[in-house]
Amino acid sequence: MYPYTQREGDLIDPRVYAIATEYGIEIIHARAYPDVRQTRAVATMDRILRNRGEDHFRMVMSTLAETENNQGQLDEHLFWAVSDLVEACKEIIEAEPSRWLEVFDAAPVGELQYIAKGLAGITHQRHAIAGMLFERVVRVFGPNAAQLDLFDERRRSA
């Protein structure tokens, strides 16, 4: 099973496998179809770890693995989108890590990924997913988070 290669001669950092195992994410072969808590995006995980560091990578893994709503489609687009958000929202994560995870737990990640697939060929799914998730982050942590939006389409009638 180990080590998969990104390109001929490039080995995956062994920390990717160790950290994935630590968070309960199984790395499967690139030709296998992933199930819940499985991914074949090992090269993407390796790039995130190498480019943004272990602490950042651990926060990405935590955001995905420690929230129930995000474990179905752990693909490269989702890893990059969450990585981008972890980078953009460092202050929020440091100040309120539990609330950060609550936002991701409440987000319909699989549905957002499905919507983003409709943009394939027009824009990168990574950016579409990141944008849709960031909108949810801003609703909770943004300047108007305490205000009720009466025109919010997600408003539920009591």
Image (cartoon, grey):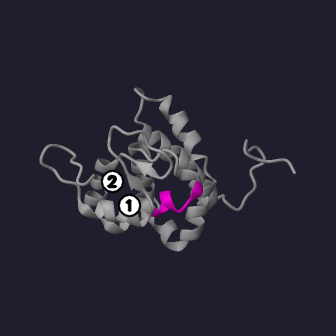
Q: Can residue 28 be seen in this view?
A: yes
Q: Is residue 11 left or right of residue 149?
A: left
Residue 58 belongs to magenta span = no
Which label is found at residue 45? 2
Q: In this view, does 51 lie to the left or right of 141?
A: left
Q: In this view, does 63 lie to the left or right of 57?
A: right
- Distance, label 2 to label 1, CA atoms, is 9 Å
Q: Which residue is drawn at 54% across and 44% down?
A: 132
The amino acid on which the numbered mark 2 sits, given as a three-letter code, is Met
Earlier along the polypeptide chain: callout 2 or callout 1? Answer: 1
Residue 38 percent across, percent down from the top left: 44, 50
The amino acid on which the numbered mark 1 sits, given as a three-letter code, is Ala
Classed neighbour count for the residue bearing mark 2: other residues with Cα under 10 Å, few (<14), some (14–19), many (≥20): many
Residue 22 percent across, percent down from the top left: 40, 67
Q: Is residue 63 left or right of residue 157?
A: left
Tell me the residue that label 1 is attached to: 20
Q: Residue at x 43, y 59 (%)?
A: 60
